[in-house]
Amino acid sequence: MKTPRLLLALAALAVAGRAQDTIKVGEYASLTGKEAGFGQTSHHGVVLAIEEINAAGGVLGKKLELAYEDNQTKPGESATAAKKLISRDKVIALIGEVSSTRSLEAAPIAQAAHVPMIAPAATNPKVTQTGNYIFRVCFIDPFQGTVMAKFAKEEVHAKRVAVMSSVSNAYSLGLAKFFKETFIAGGGEIATEKNFSEGDKDFRAQLTAVKAAGVDAVFVPGYYTECALIVRQARDLGITVPFLGGDGWEDEQLLGIGGEALNGCFYSTHFSAENTDPAVAKFVTKYKSRWNAEVPGAFSALGYDAIYVLADAIKRAGTTESAKLRDALAATKGIAGPSGITTLDKDRNASKAATIIALKGGKAVFFKTVAP
Amino acid sequence: MSEFLQQLLNGLSLGAIYALIALGYTMVYGVLRFINFAHSDVFMVGAFIGYYVGKLVPEGTLWGGMIVLIASMVGCAILGMTIERLAYRPLRGAATLNVLITAIGVSLLLEYSGQVFFGAAPRTFPQIFPSANFSVGGLVISTNQLAVILVAVLLMIGLQFIVYRTKIGTAMRAVSLNPKAAQLVGVNNDVVISFTFGLGSALAAAGGILYALNYPSIDPLMGVMPGLKAFVAAVLGGIGNIPGAALGGLILGTVETFVNGSQWSTYKDAIAFAILIIILLFRPAGLLGKFTVEKV
């Protein structure tokens, strides 16, 4: 995995001298750190899409060139990375991020500089509300929250649910809010609400309180590092009810840390490699051969789609000039990709089907898709 | 009632880990009068040594677990002594502030070289000891939690024995009281200080393994928060005082757990630290610390 990135960096250096022949696209992602899984998968999708487009002759007769920065999953670094990409690398558009909190950091900078930004998987509604230069290619949390609330009621038959959210995370708080609204409106009861912070390792205190509340299911909108530990500790404490989550659960590490404890849990996401749709199957084959048999995740598909949406907009705009590119992006319609068909609405959001994944026997299996 | 007892158990097992790390801070402070900020990163290295050695022994066996624990303690003792030899000894006699800054430097060096050597992504710590859960009247007890409390208590008793009942312990206390006078009566300060670092680092390693067993996701920055809390625990109990560090750790762990389980879970760190401030207002030297007036 190191070598291709190194080669890419060398290739980037080699062409830096004749920057005029290429179109520079910037990407900031959490390639290392606590949520490295998010950044690595989306980055792999982005690189694959760029290589494919370049192999097919590029856009407007020019090759796409990727300049990327690692924000190390740290607060504050995304803003720095976005500034660096815009001012030093003079990128024409930004791709990033998977996390809503980190996307919200970079969005005002992209907006102020009038550089279009496409978030592959930031699902919090506030991200695109930052301004008219901010777009996304995924669904938003009001939809995801509704899907999971209905799922809790109809499939899990839960009447009393506990919600545990991460206080320092815009994604987690937003998703928890939309889940609660729909669940209560559907006649359900939120028995208890507990909070934790990013980077916490001990959740036994909150879980003991959840256990005492006697619930049918627990909704934990958080990221895989915390959620896997939460479920594990819950099982240790004798909580046997299903845990439900959102797309923040999507990473191999979830099962690496949680293992068998996760059996009987569900989460919603954007994509499943097991989907039999021919577009998905083709993407999975290409992705696996490019990245040493790594199975693509939701963020791989969304990173890949973000680049195709951008390339399509550049073609339609006929230029990379920022205002025209923005208008072309805003008019994006019917771009088919592995994560579904991308059509951007007036709020610059996409509306796509949600996939529900079941965790069974230490594996993540496709359960069903829910249309928007 | 069973919820209360469960929370108490959760709190005590978290507090026992804080106490183990706090002992290292307190010992070094007791002997050298400076805060070894790199201590929390030795804790992290301890967990990583456990991770790598844990792959070599079969999972879930008692002897395998003991090998991992001992290997990690020995490895960290060597690391602790090396840090002291290379970074702190040349500065002995310099202003305390210089040593303090060096300690912060060593801490950052360990954290970020850890990211290079171990990778920044979190790893899953293997279940090296056999584990089981059993319930007693609604109370769920995991063997991991019991092991944490048990190992912490045993190590603390051992430490108390070393400091008060052995020759090297007497020398440690002599150096702590007056390093120059200790040297005059034939104590080799270098050996004593080296030993103190080794012992403290071994305790940090044990803390790291126990922490990783309970929270099996480890990364190079995992020491930062527990280290900070343990430092607070050491100050709370009276820095330089060994039973004080243990008491401080237990109080902090229990308070944090009870706040976390209540409706104010958002403010857990704020409340834990507010308690520290209040206790220090009334007892400036910590709960068990002795407040001594500097004589001129």
Image (cartoon, grey):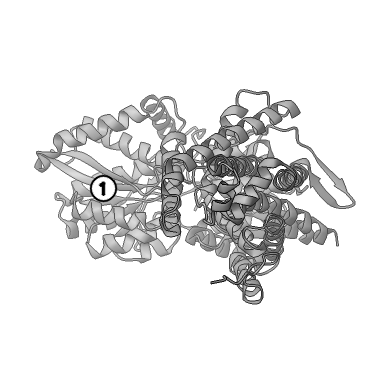
Res A116 → quadrant: bottom left
> Taking B179 as reference, is A30 left or right?
left
Residue B35 vs residue A348, the one in the foreground: B35
Q: Is residue A121 above or below residue A361?
A: below
Tell which of A348 and B123 is nearer to you. Answer: B123
- Residue B245: where, in percent of width, then height? 67, 57
Chain ID, mark 1: A
Q: Residue at x 20, y 48 (%)?
A: A314
Disc 1, SS: strand
Residue lying at the far bottom in this picture: please name it. Answer: B282
Q: Where is mark 1, residue-wise?
A: A26
Image coordinates of residue B74 in percent, x first then y, are 60, 33
Of residues B210 and A267, the one nearer the viewer is B210
Outermost residue, right side: B137
Q: Quadrant of residue A1?
A: top left
**Residue depicted at x 85% and y 46%:** B135
Image-based side of A363 in relation to A119, left or right: right
Q: Label 1: how many residues lie within 10 Å, few (<14), some (14-19) or many (20+)?
A: many
